[in-house]
Amino acid sequence: MTKKFPHLTVVGSIASGKTTAAKILAQSLQGHLVDADFFEENPFLPLYVKDMPRWAFASELYFTRLRLKKLREINKLINLQPVIVDAGLIMSTHVFCKNHLIQGTMTAAEWQFYLDLIDDLKTKIVNPDLVVYLKASPQVQFNRIKSRGRQFEKAYKIKYLNQLTDRLEELIETFQEDHQPYLVFDAEKHNILKVSGKKALISQVKAAIKSL
């Protein structure tokens, strides 16, 4: 059956507004939201925050398992309505896990095992038609993290947010090479908690969908 509806994935660093943006787009496009951005359910996360090298691999595997389970819903939904994914495997693999390798909190062997595992498991996962990247500076991310006051986020530093932003910029480069359609949305200029920012997001995304 020919796919009729768009499949979007929203990516961005911590506190960039991914979850809010995904909800806005799901409502605007009358689509189904697949929330694949987890934090509270992971039993390894408190341990990871205290000792990253010891618990990074276990924590990312746990997140990935949850995301894979969620993303399998897409195959049933995509012919019925638009699908908007919050985070997904793109963030797990190309941002968080890759950054663990680069910063030394995941070994080369763990990284390769993770990639091999993803290759084995993601074959039934549909690739997005459009990736929406919410871009905000690390300082803005840091300020938002402080203001929302989540306990497990208190250990995050500017250096770490800089690293995640670097990984996202590298990801955009791979999109260009792989001809993956994407949209960079300035989440710093446009505050999606305000009406004007929300309208800008919806307008830009709808325009990008039309150009697919």
Image (spheres, rainbow, N blue to C red):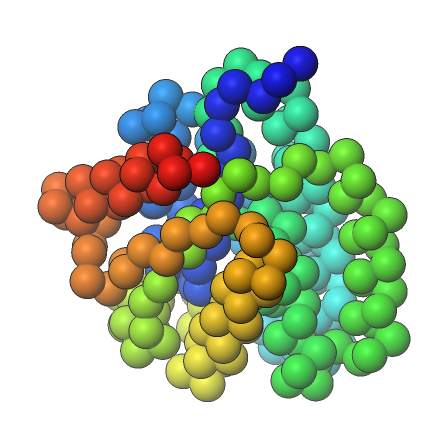
Q: Position of residue 143 (x, y in %)?
A: 28, 72
Q: Say left or right for 15 vs 152.
A: left
Q: Say left or right for 38 vs 192.
A: right
Residue at image position (62%, 28%) is: 74
Q: Nearer the viewer, residue 173 or 157?
A: 173
Q: Say left or right for 36 vs 147.
A: right
Number of numbered discs overlaid on the protein picture = 0
Q: Position of residue 196 (x, y in %)?
A: 12, 46
Q: Position of residue 198 (x, y in %)?
A: 21, 43
Report whether residue 160 is seen: yes
Q: Position of residue 88 (x, y in %)?
A: 59, 47
Residue at image position (82%, 51%) is: 119
The image quarter in which residue 210 lies: top left
Residue at image position (36%, 42%) is: 208
Residue 53 in the image: above or below residue 189: below
Q: Considering the image in quadrants, where does the N terminus appear?
A: top right
Q: Say left or right for 134 vs 62.
A: left
Residue at image position (66%, 35%) is: 126
Residue 195 in the image: above or below residue 1: below
Q: Nearer the viewer, residue 10 or 107?
A: 10
Q: Considering the image in quadrants, where does the C terminus appear?
A: top left
Report whether residue 164 is seen: no
